[in-house]
Amino acid sequence: MTESTPLGGVDLVLADLDGVVYRGAQAIPHAVESINSAANSRRIGYITNNASRTPESVAEQLTGLGLHVVADDVVTSPQAAVRLLAEIVPAGSLVLAVGGEGLRVELANAGFAVTDSAEDRPAAVIQGFAQDIGWAQLAEAAYALQGEGADVPWVATNTDWTLPTARGTAPGNGTLVSAIHLAVGRLPVVAGKPEVAIFEEALQRFGGTKPLFIGDRLDTDILGANRAGIDSVLVLTGVDKAKQVLAADQYSRPTYILEDLRGLHEPYPDIRDETAADGSRVVTVGSAVVRMAGHVVSVVEDGDNRVDLLRAGTAAIWGSGLAIYGLDVAPALYE
């Protein structure tokens, strides 16, 4: 069987940013040149749950890293959230906004009036991430959503629990949303990944008949792409690594697993899944071989490529239908 690359037949590439293109201010190795190469024959769009920045500022950063990007190439969770909000409350409504410039600019562009105080009796609350959000802003949102405001709509740009930064993993918008949730006993409507609204925004803007989404998180990127019916790449340069991939549930499994974005242009190996004479399953990817006998997953051959070993391990585990917590998995697969 002839091996094809993950880009085979793809006419639209959608990429997450944090953990895929950059970490903090620095480009992730091999990301820029790999995306630029893909852009020679495909439309490239960027999707981010980061609600603190405008598309213009994101495009400026990406251009500075060596990519060819304009603001319209960037789809942000505030854009998707404001689109949702417009379906819930009339244009021109007064909205209490908890978030940064990216959120406030999109609200203004859509014609909404913005307040920071629950005392103004806003028609809705919209919440996104910003590094300077503190107790006072969260409290105003909570005040607006309780008592007489118990029926006030609440829209969140995203609920990412963590945010990758140059210094490490930091709390994400999900932690701030959770603070309000615990105070008022209700949950928001969510626009960003893993919900489909942000993918719908991207597909409507960019078109394409065979899109491919690239992300670094199973619980937002890959789950969201699967919900939207889009093939996906999990690249191991961001949040989720081998251990999380092996344990991925059936809704959060990517189409492709890549060590870095050079793999977009490299042949993706076939998976050979066979039954041995003793009844065990033997999965081969490249020169890596994994055996699954009952609940024991072992490495037969490490192979020449670490990611091929992971691909073989995931094929064995995912294909078994067994829960990861009931398996004895060789540490070589995830260490």
Image: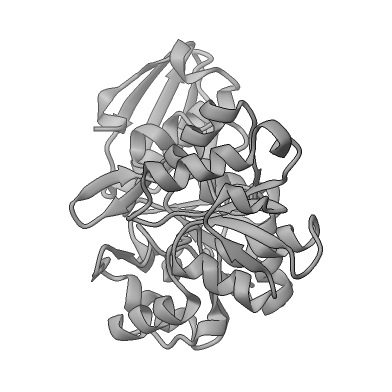
Q: How is the image coloured?
A: one colour
Relative to 96, is 34 above or below? below
Whether residue 275 sits left or right of residue 205 in the image: it is left
Q: Quadrant of the N terminus?
A: bottom right
Residue 148 lies, in percent from the top left, at 72, 36
Write down the quadrant of residue 192 in the picture: bottom right
Above-or-below relation of 292 to 42: above
Q: Is residue 198 left or right of residue 290?
A: right
Q: How many marks?
A: 0
Outermost residue toward the left?
167
Instruction: Identify the residue shown where x is 29% and y is 34%.
Output: 301
Q: Nearer the viewer, residue 188 or 27?
A: 188
Image coordinates of residue 266 in percent, x first then y, are: 41, 67
Spot the residue most to the front: 119
Q: Residue at x 81, y 63 (%)?
A: 90
Height in image: 128 above or below 105? Answer: above
Where residue 136 sits in the image (x, y, percent)? 41, 45
Residue at 18% in and 52% down: 167
| Res. 7 in view | no
Q: Which residue is at 53% across, 68% downward?
A: 104
Judging depth in this view, the residue of 47 and 111 nearest the camera is 111
Where is residue 37 shown, x and y percent of the image?
Answer: 42, 82
Left or right of 146? Residue 283 is left
Residue 82: name its quadrant.
bottom right
Residue 198 in the figure: left or right of residue 279: right
Rendered position, 69 above or below 269? below
Q: Nearer the viewer, residue 2 or 98?
A: 98
User: Would you say residue 177 is visible in this rendering?
Assistant: yes
Quarter holding the C terminus?
Answer: top left
